[in-house]
Amino acid sequence: SSSSAEAASASSCAPMPVASAEDEPYDGVGLEECIEALTADDPEIAARAADALLDVPAGGASSGQRGAPWAYAVVAAGAVIPLLALVQRVRRDARDGLKPKPAESCPENTDAVVAGGDAALLVLAEVANAAASFLQEEGWEVAYDEDTERPIFVDEKSGMSQSAPPALERSRGDWVVGVMIEALTLIQPLDVDEQTHEPRWPVRVLRHVWRSAESEAPNSNDTPTSLSVLDIAVEEGGFDERTRVLVRGAWRGSQGDVEGEMDPNEKPGTALDSWRDATVFAALVLGLAADSIPQVKPKRVLVLGLRCGAVPAFLKRFLPSVAVDVVEESAAVVSAARDFFRADFTEEPFGELTREGFRARLDRTPPDTHYRVWSGVDARTFLEAAARAPDDGAASFFDGVVGDLPFFSSNRSALEFFRAMRASKLVHPERATVALAGGWTSDARRSFGGACAAAAA
């Protein structure tokens, strides 16, 4: 429609060509259901969902009202990444104003795929419109830089401009507002690949898995979360300069917390890009160095949570003599680590093993060149299974445990976890180093407090 096209133009200054979706919106669909449908394998369903999102009542707004409360609710519900995925699914040609490539030369651009991309652009444009109103309230204007063909932000008092979205008072402590403002820059490419003529997006969606048990977070309150793999471009860098991140739940912006990150141009294990990972690794090294008791068997370390595979890969690279086992519950995380972060490991599907088979495999250390991932099992179940397994008298002690602190709903559950760790006989009660890190949500902080009390007990 003409009004939708005008909305897109107002928010992004020089938008990509957008056509209105012709399908009728869903009747009576809720916000969560609509966002879930954005990730459907069927492009027609995804296109209809994106179109319907424009009319879904959200944030106290009535159906069809798309002001700031509606936009805020859409972003808070985690819609930005699946919407970007629909936009980027459309193959575009920079030589023709970033219009979709014709289906004759690009079979991937079916009518449904293009309709989904157009509808997603319209939704993001409405979000950007709301963000522009926030900026205007605090003395900023959104303009268009003809040289870079990108939006810029102009301070109305000084007349100075900048390419990065400004930090607003409204966005302090509120990641949703920050993502809304960043949305102004997300639908315009940074530049174009000279060979393929494909756009380089500020944030490219490589994979997005909607909320499911397969993507459940080990340090959450057991509420299924979405899982995303994204490439964050280095704005002033070359076409191939980017940071690859693993995100659980709603994306909180380019500077938001992530589950794991790495430079895809580097070999896995080259560096630890997270202060959390670096801290637990340093604690482990100090603990292993302090253990002066000679061992016949090589030292073994248990990692709770695979994430992008950075921690176990770093361990194997810089402590090659240490045998590394990883416990990872989420099948989606295991798949993402292997497919996008080049994680190289031996997988042991926990659910396929008998109790006797589990202990027999556990007693055997992983190969020197790989770490081993026990998939489909959470840390508590892993420890309990080790304690219940038939004991042949040769306990498999780990010299260190690092990684993600499991979520504890109460101090009692934290106490039970550490008791299970002791009872499992996997961790030496006197010599082992345990270094676990939690998240920064309010629930995670309460869980961490309970864990500290339980560990001391």
Image (tube, helix red, strand yellow):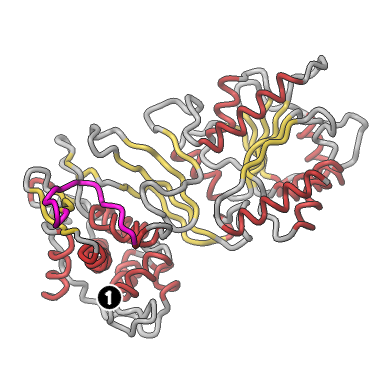
Q: Dot 1: what SS? A: loop
Vertical placement of residue 13 versus 261, above or below: below
Q: For the residue marked with disc 1, what is the amino acid?
A: Gly
Q: Quadrant of residue 281?
A: top right
In the rendering, at what x and y percent does residue 147 appear? 7, 43
Q: Left of 252 or right of it: where is 166?
A: left
Observer able to see residue 118: no
Residue 364 in the magenta stretch? The answer is no
Label 1, residues with CA under 10 Å away: few <14, some 14-19, many ≥20: some
Q: Position of residue 91 (x, y in %)?
A: 21, 51
Residue beneath the point at 68% across and 23% down? 286
Identity of the residue drawn at 20% across and 44% down: 190
Residue behind mark 1: 67
Which residue is more in the foreground, 405 or 1? 405
Q: Which residue is found at the position 49% from the left and 44% from the top?
A: 336
Q: What percent of the width, then of the height, locates residue 416? A: 81, 52
Q: Residue furthest front?
A: 157
In-image side of 168 versus 269 (left or right): left
Q: Position of residue 253 (x, y in %)?
A: 37, 52
Q: Which residues are magenta?
A: 155-169
Q: Is residue 202 visible?
A: yes
- Left or right of residue 133: residue 37: right
Residue under the point 59% across and 59% down: 213
Question: What main secondary structure does the magenta stretch of the protein show?
Answer: loop
Nearest the viewer among 126 and 136 is 136
Quick one: quadrant of the N terminus? bottom left
